[in-house]
Amino acid sequence: MATISDTFNQYFNQLDRLDLELLIAHTLKKPREFVISHPDYTMTKKQETITKHLISRRLKHEPMAYILGQKEFYGLNFKVNKNTLIPRPETEILVESVISNLQLVIGENKKYTTIIDLGTGSGNIIISIAKEIIKSKLPITNYQLLASDISAKALRVAKQNARLNKVDKKIKFLKSDLLNVFLKNKECSVLCAPCSVIITANLPYLSKKIYKSTMPDVKNYEPKSALLSSTDGLKHYKKLLEQIKKIQNKCSMFHVMCYLEISPEQKPKIQKIIKSILPKSKITFHKDLAKRWRVCQIEL
Ligand SMILES: C[S@@+](CC[C@H](N)C(=O)[O-])C[C@H]1O[C@@H](n2cnc3c(N)ncnc32)[C@H](O)[C@@H]1O
């Protein structure tokens, strides 16, 4: 039977050391520190078989997050599976941008605020915002949190994540193609009330060309419907902006702030699209930690 160090020796030139440590830790149901500090631990036959199976999945480029069934985002744990995009660290900047503005929108203006996360996927954005609101000492009682996705399977995971992170009572999940559900008469009242609306959206935004160049980990495993958008990756955002214009035409009190995650090269194109659809809007861009344009903030 193999020890932990035998397994390292067998695979060290094929797999990343950290990945190996995490896969063994996952099999043994022990923390990574245990794996590091017990090289002579002998695995049972069953543990050896499971570890080999996990390693073979990783060798075929399956992302670690899918193998482990979870991913950390904004200091929280999120369950993920093949129906949800794996939360990316660059999306944390979108959450940060929203949080830094909440003080102003909810705290100072003291307006009833509705936050809607579109294309919620695993629910990482809205759940992180919910946790931050609870953690902050903002006197926020008058707000509601909504999250939607076109994929029922992704929504199922998002709801599980809300439960895991103890915010399931705070967030309402809806199945919708962008804002369609809110454009229906009954739901439109949510947006037309005299309140501030914040829309967060990390929608599919990869152009065909960029999608084709992604690593096998992405292309062969993550849902294409979560990544690819036509019209240079901007079809979803263009449709969303047109829906916002429609709501604005219906409701004079509609005040919205949008935070859209983009691909850095899309900055000039999206700016042009926004100006053509919503000419009176104020547009600001935020960079991610790699100093690349990542979030487009639109105020109406
Ligand atoms: C890039 S993923 C983002 C997931 C998650 N918000 C995150 O930050 O990791 C895009 C999500 O948008 C959803 N989606 C795609 N088209 C949509 C549409 N027309 N309306 C609503 N959601 C859509 C996908 O199912 C996917 O969950």
Image: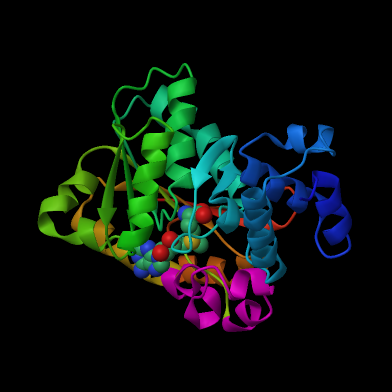
| Residue occupying the point 43% across, 56% down | 121
| Residue occupying the point 42% across, 70% down | 236
Q: Is residue 215 magenta?
A: yes
| Residue occupying the point 69% across, 60% down | 52
Camera-side residue of 138 and 174:
174
Give residue 296's position: percent from left, percent from top.
55, 55
| Most common SS among magenta residues | helix
| Residue occupying the point 49% across, 76% down | 229
Q: Which residues are magenta?
A: 208-236
Give residue 71's position: percent from left, percent from top.
58, 47
Camera-side residue of 287 and 38:
38
Give residue 102's position: percent from left, percent from top.
46, 32
Quick check: can you spot residue 158? yes
Instruction: Report whether 138 appears left or right of 25.
Output: left
Instruction: Report whether 117 appears left or right of 33.
Output: left
Q: Is residue 160 magenta?
A: no
Give residue 67's position: percent from left, percent from top.
59, 56
